[in-house]
Amino acid sequence: MMSMDEQAALMTGSLEHLQVPLDFEEFFETERERLFRALLLVTHDSAEAEDLMQEAFVRIWERWDRVAQVEDPVGYLFKTAMNLHRSALRRALTAAKRSLRPPAGRDPFDEVADRDEAVRSLALLTPRQRAAVVVTELLGYSSEEAGAILGVRPGTVRTLTSQARATLLAWKEPDDD
């Protein structure tokens, strides 16, 4: 029974790749073109095939002292290259899932509901109370600064803001009747 490498060798007409090379350079020269062609068929992209081929050979070179001793270093090379390809596919799939996932954030319907509630609650206030709340709470000015903006004393701003809070609190609380 012939191995897959022997069958492939018979189809290509050469058996030289079945002999274990003595050094890495010879191994590289013997298998470089075959690995590139196989990866090109798998990836359909010459740049990606080249990158995968180079990475596979680098990994084999880093472990050459052990790889040269295995029963089938060529098979080990091809397995390494295919594993690299599968890893790249998994990384691409993970990245695609992340980019297609809606961003974590607030629900737009909740934002609309909050805005509607804010507009309706501000409509309950007198124009002066509304102005005091907007300048102090929304815009973040102090009572002194808000007084200068609104043309009233700082104490008046604090009183208007306090009255506005009391009105909004009463509106928010459910009726106990």
Image (tube, rainbow, N blue to C red):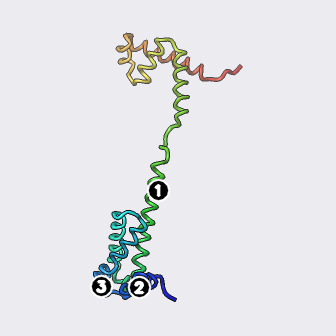
The CA distance from mark 3 to mark 1 is 38 Å
Above/below status of 149 relative to 16: above
- The number of numbered badges drawn on the structure is 3
Q: Which residue is mark 1?
A: 94
Q: Would you say 100 lies left or right of 65 here? A: right
Above/below status of 49 relative to 8: above
Of the residues shown, which amino acid type is indicated by label 2? Val
The label on residue 23 is: 3
- Residue 110, x across and y down, in percent: 55, 33
The residue depicted at 49 percent of the width and 87 percent of the height is 2
Front residue of 65/145: it is 65
Q: Provide the secondary structure element on which disc 1 rests.
A: helix
Of the residues shown, which amino acid type is indicated by label 3? Asp
- Residue 158, x across and y down, in percent: 44, 16
The residue depicted at 31 percent of the width and 87 percent of the height is 22
Front residue of 170/92: it is 92
The residue depicted at 55 percent of the width and 15 percent of the height is 124
Front residue of 154/136: it is 136
Quick one: label 3 or label 1, which is nearer the N terminus? 3
Q: Which residue is mark 2?
A: 70
Q: Provide the secondary structure element on which disc 2 rests.
A: loop
Q: Residues within 10 Å of mark 3 (few under 14, many from 20)?
A: few
